[in-house]
Amino acid sequence: MDSADYLEWPFFEPRHRALNDKLAVWTASHQPLLDSNGHDIERVTRAIAAELGNAGWLRYLVPATLGGPLPAIDVRSLCLIRESLAFHSGIADCAFAIQGLGSAPLTLFGNAALKQKYLPGMIEGKRLGAFALSEPESGSDVARLRTAARRDGNAYLLNGAKTWISNAGIADHYIVFARTGEPGDAKGLAAFVVDAGTPGLAITEKIDIVAPHVIGTLIFNDCRVDASALLGEPGEGFRIAMSTLDIFRATVGAAALGFARRALHEAIDRVGRREVFGQKLAQFQATQMRIADMAVEVDAAALLVYRAAWTKDTQERRVTRESAMAKLYATEAAQRVIDSAVQLFGGLGVTVGSTVERLYREIRPLRIYEGTSEIQKIVIATQLLGK
Ligand code: COS
């Protein structure tokens, strides 16, 4: 990546600078893998997850007691990893992020037996996880999700549908949020770990999205899940989902930051070489204004992302507002920065296969997944104004 002088900011410690240096070496030596975009996306996602496991990056998803390199999950490290991966490859970033969403509920709320069963394989990149929260009728309004979990002896019977689920069809397990209580009640949800291949669980659709990605729909039809697969207590599902998102929303901002930095890097390179009307693009004041705006947005996004991550790592409190601000600003700003880069590239910017064209597609879902920009504004306003 470009100048890492932002790592001198007070949010960081020497270990973060060391991590960033190691990431730079790793990404440079894995360029062919990171460049494999678009074709056979399931195989590529699996291969990248395995390499992320071999390199030890997935260990950052768990604390030392579960095999991680640090005493607790360090959100600044997760953000640095996502930023570096996203700079090179949206698929690699996604593979890392979904391992996080598929493991954090276990790390935070699973009992010893569940952690032992699922986490070692996940951090080695041998097992893939998934986070199944969204439904056809409820993506934003989590409290209204309909998938039902009905107690039946020592088990629960799951019935319902989940959609837009990353890793659908290649995950070895799914963290599934389902209703054990009253309809519409945030306190009526529970979270389960459901193994792929459990009878009654079917992957019914693979969805093609603008940025190639493994994503699809799951249907539960009297899917019997042992009560021992419950995370926490019945009723804790909403808190489990939100606590996971409190960690990962800042990291979505970090991924957007990685995309935006790449776009700025590509744009600076381009305007220094491209000649029009007898001079370099960089010599036009219009270009300079645009590059300056892009750089300010990148730094502002970085400040919000690492403020949220630092707060989560060092303050013993919820970071719902900070992580919502980081995700909102960084993803929206990255879309503008990338759009500017496309404009500076002209026809090449919209030519399929160019880096900025890829970034233009890859940034778009980040303003939607893990809470749309509008939901982040509601979260921020609720924190300030109350309900
Ligand atoms: N951590 C822990 N607990 C939390 C929490 C958090 N971040 N956010 C809310 N809670 C608690 C609340 O404190 C509340 O408990 P009390 O009643 O005891 O105070 C309970 O959970 C319900 O919270 P709230 O009333 O705020 O829930 P709402 O139904 O109004 O929903 C939004 C809030 C819209 C913010 C939530 O549904 C959301 O984030 N939606 C987007 C989900 C999303 O990201 N979807 C994409 C799927 S993942 S790709």
Image (cartoon, grey):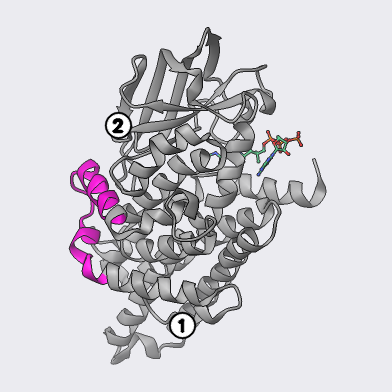
**Quarter containing ligand 1?**
top right
Marks 2 and 1, how far apart in space? 48 Å
**Region rendered in magenta:** 28-52
Compared with 117, 185 (above or below) is above
Per the rendering, the mark at residue 169 is: 2
Q: Secondary structure at mark 1?
A: helix
Q: Residues within 10 Å of mark 1 (few under 14, many from 20)?
A: few
Which kind of residue does numbered mark 1 sit on?
A: Ala
Per the rendering, the mark at residue 339 is: none
The majority secondary structure of the magenta stretch comes to helix
Compared with 330, 167 (above or below) is above
The picture places residue 356, in percent across and down from the top left corner, at 32, 65
- Please tell me which residue lies in front, 56 or 296: 56
Q: Residues within 10 Å of mark 2 (few under 14, many from 20)?
A: many
Which is more foreground, mark 2 or mark 1?
Answer: 2
Q: Residue at x 52, y 20 (%)?
A: 147
Q: Are marks 2 and 1 in contact (CB under 8 Å)?
A: no
Decide which of tag 2 and tag 1 comes sooner along the chain. Answer: 2
Q: Residue at x 48, y 83 (%)?
A: 5
Q: Is residue 232 in view from this perspective?
A: yes
Which kind of residue does numbered mark 2 sit on?
A: Gly
